[in-house]
Amino acid sequence: MTRRRRIYEGKAKVLFEGPEPGTLVQYFKDDATAFNNQKHGIITGKGVLNNRISEYLMTRLGEIGVPTHFVRRLNMREQLVREVEIIPIEVVVRNIAAGSLTRRFAIPEGTPLPRSIVEYYYKSDDLNDPMVAEEHITAFGWASPQDLDDMMSLALRVNDYLTGLFLGIGLKLVDFKLEFGRLWENDEMRIVVADEISPDNCRLWDVKTNEKLDKDRFRQDLGRVAEAYQEVARRLGILPEVGPTDVRGPVAIT
Ligand code: UDP
């Protein structure tokens, strides 16, 4: 890491001032936390894998017209992103019951949901990220009704696209979390996908065996965490197997 101004340090990433105004450098750490910071660990190589996986997914989303903050990957652990005003809401999309949903409604893990469910959580470590309704979000001014509308429709587009992409490589997209930001261009504002999309914030299960290939391996002490992230990258075809030029693209599972 070179010397530059550190803007923000989160649990899994650090944001530095970027090379030009309006840009930031997002550095991916190997740190993992769960249960609102009560559990902490280091997963060697996770940052490198998440940087690569998030680059790949954000690029694919950009290609189908989903705006994101991603500009380009700079090196193994860093990517250049547009500076956005982060909306303090985590948007969770669920396709199959897992995690907090199973506890809240006593639904067995793995139950397919009748339709995709979108939930909102207010980003606050002090309050333990409480689930909130649209009413709270607009009344407390965290996002406008128009922002929320854009976030919801982008989240569903991302879900449709990623569900298909992962199914093609033998993975079920069980659920995932997105963050959004306001990107200002001249006097125009657009809502864009921000943060990262990686096995840290998606649940991914093998289609045939239901093996977990995501952060639940860390949360539930299942072991082989880095190997699981690596398997996701391998299936996406973005893991250099021989050398840096040996990147093949997704491997279809038939
Ligand atoms: N998630 C996340 N960050 C959070 C909370 C959840 O990335 O602070 C992701 C999580 O990885 C999962 C989805 O959002 O893919 C739904 O998580 P859930 O509400 O089930 O929470 P958990 O079981 O992690 O408490």
Image: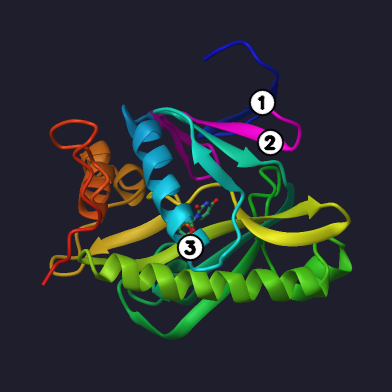
The amino acid marked with disc number 2 is Thr
Numbered label tally: 3
The amino acid marked with disc number 1 is Pro
Which residue ends up furthest to the top in the rendered image? 3
Query: Crowdedness of circle 2 by 10 Å Cα count: few (<14), some, many (20+)?
Result: some
Query: Residue under circle 3?
Result: 63
Image quadrant in which the C terminus is located: bottom left
Query: Residue under circle 2?
Result: 23
The amino acid marked with disc number 3 is Glu
Q: Is mark 1 within 8 Å of ligand 1?
A: no
Disc 2 to disc 3: CB gap under 8 Å = no
- Comparing 127 with 233, the one in front is 233
Q: Which residues are magenta?
A: 17-41
Q: Is residue 184 above or below residue 174?
A: above
- Comparing 113 with 1, the one in front is 1
Disc 2 to disc 1: CB gap under 8 Å = yes
